[in-house]
Amino acid sequence: VDLRRVVWELSHQAYAVYGKARLWPDQWPRPIFPADTSNPQPGEWTPYANKLLVAPRLGELLSKWRDLPHTARRTRDVLTRLLEALVRYKQLVVLQMQQERKKKQDEEEKKRREQQQLRQLQLQREQEKALKEEALRALEAEHE
């Protein structure tokens, strides 16, 4: 199961409690409801986790709500699972970014090596050409 979908679904459950109570911060994105609730399309839920991940004080406030003594057990479970899913998703995003950075560095290193090899080949050709010209001049000088 895609972690973005898990975050989106759990966010709906958390929003049902905290949005209704007007506690959901204005700076946080609200989970949108799909056109077809039985078959949400990826475009309706895939961008949400990234938006929520950068919400200010997200972990702090979700943890606070989870740890309040009057929080219902079911809500506490939803908040716990949401926090865990967000942590796993963030780790996945960081890993993907590291892999992309490594791939880019590898590509740049490969390009640098290829350019260096090309420069060496050009230098070698120039040296060979200079030697041939020098040998040709030496032969011409002998025949004069």
Image (tube, rainbow, N blue to C red):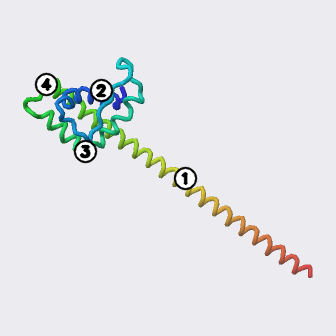
Q: Secondary structure at mark 4?
A: helix
Q: CA distance from mark 1 to mark 4?
A: 55 Å
Check disc 3 and report its element: helix, strand or loop. loop
Which residue in the structure is indicated by mark 1? 110
Quadrant location of residue 144? bottom right
The x, y position of residue 44, in whole percent, is: 39, 29
Task: Give above or below for 134 relative to 104.
Answer: below
77 horizontally vs 29: left or right: left
Secondary structure under badge 2?
Answer: helix
Front position among marks 1 and 3: 3
**Residue 2, quarter of the rendered image:** top left
Q: Is residue 120 left or right of residue 29?
A: right
At label 2, the amino acid type is: Glu
Q: Which residue is mark 2?
A: 9
Residue type beneath disc 1: Lys
Q: Looking at the image, is 132 positioned above or below residue 30?
A: below
Q: Earlier in the sequence, mark 1 or mark 3?
A: 3
Task: Please rate how many residues cluster around mark 3, counting C-alpha atoms within 10 Å: few if below 14, some from 14 to 19, many from 20.
Answer: few
Residue on which the image places disc 3: 56
Report the amino acid beneath label 4: Arg
